[in-house]
Amino acid sequence: MNWKRYMKNLMPAMLINLAGMVALALFLLASGSSIDTVVFIVVIWLLVFVIYMVVSCYGRKRYLDKLLDITDQLEEAYLIADLMKEPERADDEVFYQILKLAEKSMLENISAVMQERRDYRDYIEQWVHEVKTPITAMKLLCENHPSEFSRAILTELEKVDRFTEQTLYYARSEHTQKDYAIREIQLSDVVHGAIADNKYLLRQNDVSIEMEMVTDTVYTDDKWVRFILNQLIGNSIKYRTEKPRLTFYTEQQSNQVLLFIKDNGIGIAEADLPRVFEKGFTGQNGRNIQNSTGIGLYLCKRLCDKLGIGLSLHSGNNGTTAILSFHINHFLVQG
């Protein structure tokens, strides 16, 4: 509370009391009262007024500071009215009712927005599932009629499939707990699955694959991890060199299993590395290639955080290495 402004607001009351003291003093003197009596009465009045002002200001300050502290601790400050005690002062009661009305309006708006988001997410999920049917049908048609043209179509279909998956997982990323199942998985199976998802794209770009000791077992959701690997593989191909190569290997460090996805691509500028997981950030490479959206790595990081998986990128002149860190749960392993 600003004391200077508060005292300024009380200035009319102080001037009225001062005028009352002067008027009373003049009246008593005109009535024949002694100066000592007049001074005594004025001093008592002034003392009572000062004590009242000090106690009133102190109580008011404590009340308002407490409200500010409660508001600062709330994640949704508009709910302050629910934690406030109904005030005793008439003017505070008016502001309390205003806060209640504002809270009600805010909750109604939030409820409407949340419903719109749910409806939009449901529509996106339904659209993705519907569009997957013609994508699968086109894949089957191309695979049943092999040719250079059909292989080119299959490569583009893999890109379309990855983009639709990206859309679906983005829509679900806020509610991963409703769509994952933690179980024991072989990392080699997930890696092979991700490679199979991109086989035509890898073949078209003549990408060589190396698997080095990917034998570890972790507890996670294989579908989500496979999606993350698809995004990382897609990025490696997008920013490839003339003879692209992808290497997968694992290491154990203390209580973690590290899955490395290493490429020999053009790498990431050192200045861009701290921001690669920001939504919409494309960096120098994205500006050069033009078709970068800045969503893939952002979504990978978001999903990893939800699943408790560490994700980091290291880059240099020899390409980029993505590292997925899985925690080893010794209780589950021993059980």
Image (cartoon, rainbow, N blue to C red):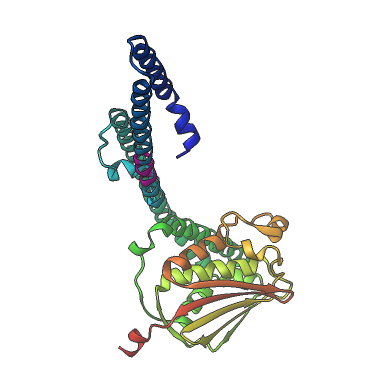
* Quarter of the figure that contains the C terminus: bottom left
Residue visible at 36% across and 9% down?
30
Residue 261 lies, with reference to residue 148, above or below; the image says: below
List x then y, in percent, for residue 308: 43, 71
Residue visible at 42% across and 82% down?
218
Residue 209 lies, with reference to residue 122, above or below; the image says: below
Locate residue 316: give its quadrant. bottom right
> Which is more toward the observer, 280 or 227?
280
Side of 97 where 165 appears, left or right: right
> Which is more toward the observer, 241 or 325?
325
List x then y, in percent, for residue 143: 51, 68
> Which is more toward the observer, 9 or 247?
9
What is the chief secondary structure element of the magenta stretch? Answer: helix
| Region rendered in magenta | 59-67
List x then y, in percent, for residue 168: 44, 57
List x then y, in percent, for residue 265: 69, 72
* Quarter of the figure that contains the N terminus: top left
Disc tally is: 0
> Which is more toward the observer, 47 or 223?
47
Residue 303 lies, with reference to residue 314, above or below; the image says: above
Residue 313 lies, with reference to residue 14, above or below; the image says: below
Residue visible at 41% across and 17% down?
22
Q: Is residue 326 magenta?
A: no
Locate residue 83: give its quadrant. top left
Side of 265 where 101 appears, left or right: left
Q: Is residue 66 magenta?
A: yes
